[in-house]
Image (spheres, rainbow, N blue to C red):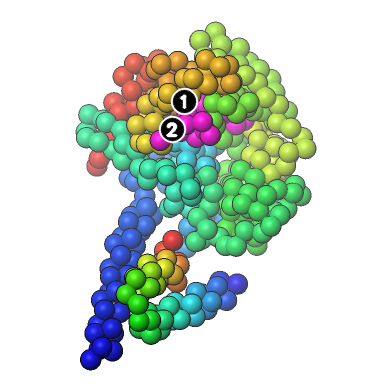
Amino acid sequence: MQIVYHLIVFYLTCHFIWYLFREKKFWNKVSVALVLIMFLLRLFLIK
Amino acid sequence: MRNIKGNFISALLLLFAIAICFLSTLKFLSMQKKEAIFPSRGLTSRKMLSSYFPGLKKTWGDTDVYLYEGQEKGGNLLILGGAHANEPAGFITAVLLIENIQVSTGKIIIVPRANNSGFTHSQPQEGNPQRYSLESPWGRRHFRHGSRLTNPVHQWPDPSIYINPAGQKLSGADSRNLNRCYPGRKTGSLTEKIASGIMELIKKEKIDLALDLHEAAPEYPVINAIVFHENSADLAALTLMELQIEGFDFRLEASPTNLRGLSHREWGDHAQIMAILLESANASHGRLKGKTSPALIVEGKDKNYMKAAKLGLLFVPYGEDGIPLKLRVARHLAAVKSILSNLEELYPEKRIEIKNMPSSSELKKVGIGPFLNPPN
């Protein structure tokens, strides 16, 4: 179960990073970066 | 050119996110660090819970077990603190006993952080502080203020409905509540394995009497209470009378036979021992409190609770002095002392004799700090 969870979080993290570079608008980029923090923390199971 | 600028901003934002993650990680990982406990000279040995149940080895459920054995044979007592890591009176009472006592007759086993995983995170959505501190002659000592439940990082996901090892249907989050998981499952979740480890300890150390130290909100009906299994009814009744003579207001609560998975029920049913759970009143634990701060945890003063007391909404007296931690710990210590003296009266062969136990009246006067050991 934990592996499936990790894979989902990893996929979404990659997706956000890709989106961060693709997005043109500055404030949208900032929003993505903020969401990314939570996903990185979950990816490494810190919180 | 515009693309390069956009990518540069994205890279900067990515670095910003990584930096925030790094700083947050340091903060979260610091919550996993155990505060030091400095045992008294009377300590006979120190083990890990995994030495009773190897299934806990290298997990966050493994925890320290302190053994104090007297030269004369007598009864065997288990004291459990920190089953709920956000109930500091139970944990601090266990710490004070570890740092002070010497046992001359019988055996005392103390587990201060029964649910070690619960100490590694905070109660979600409560704005609880991560630590509280106590002044001692040797400087300030900091203690973790954890959560009632096992850390979801260590046990995930919660089921929609949890059917505990004793067959009781509970809410999903209770699958991480140690005091709903007895008698445990050896192949179950982390919390069930901890419960199983404690049951193994009780059986292997031939425990006669086990005490589980807790706290609850002042508006909760089972408060300032001695909750007893029918195996320990006489002991609990005698203890209540003695404590009331000493000026401590306690009430007796029989362990309900249809509420399964709790320590006082399953320890008695599955290990046939005398099982008692003690509750004290903690304002930082309740729904009516204002801001939760380290001061509220230690001093126990809250304006909302004073108002609630005036409106008659509480099950305990609550005045301007609040219910400080030193008083809550003093109550637990007075109960432990009284339980031991009555154990001797009822079962002389199970006598347990302790020296250097912190006196509850002294504790109420001078506070907890002077009873803490210097760092070694």
Residue at x-position 43% and y-position 52%:
B120
Residue wearing tag 2? B290
Q: Same chain for marks 2 and 1?
A: yes
Residue B25 visible in the displayed image:
yes
Location of the C terminus of chain B by quadrant is: top left
The front one of B226 and B57 is: B226
Residue at x-position 37% and y-position 26%:
B299
| The furthest residue to the top | B245
Residue wearing tag 1? B304
Could you tell me residue B74's position as x and y percent?
56, 29
Check if residue A23 falls in the magenta segment: no
Q: Note whether B122 is above or below A12 in the view shown.
A: above
Check if residue B288 falls in the magenta segment: yes
Q: Which range of residues does the magenta coloring cover? A: B276-291
Residue contact between numbered discs 2 and 1, judged by CB atoms under 8 Å: yes
Q: Amino acid at mark 2?
A: Gly
Q: Image quadrant of residue B36?
A: top left
Location of the N terminus of chain B by quadrant is: bottom left
Q: Dot 2, how many residues are within 10 Å of its Cα: few (below 14), some (14-19), or many (20+)?
A: some
Indicate the chain on which mark 1 is placed.
B
Residue at x-position 54% and y-position 49%:
B149
* Left or right: where B243 falls relative to B330: right
Could you tell me residue B156's position as x and y percent?
57, 62
Q: Dot 1, how many residues are within 10 Å of its Cα: few (below 14), some (14-19), or many (20+)?
A: some
* Left or right: where A25 falls relative to B218: left
Q: CA distance from mark 2 to mark 1?
A: 7 Å
Q: How many marks?
A: 2
Indicate the chain on which mark 2 is placed.
B
User: Helix or strand or loop: what does disc 1 sit on?
Assistant: helix
Which label sits on residue A38?
A: none
Could you tell me residue B252's position as x and y percent?
65, 21
Q: Amino acid at mark 1?
A: Asn
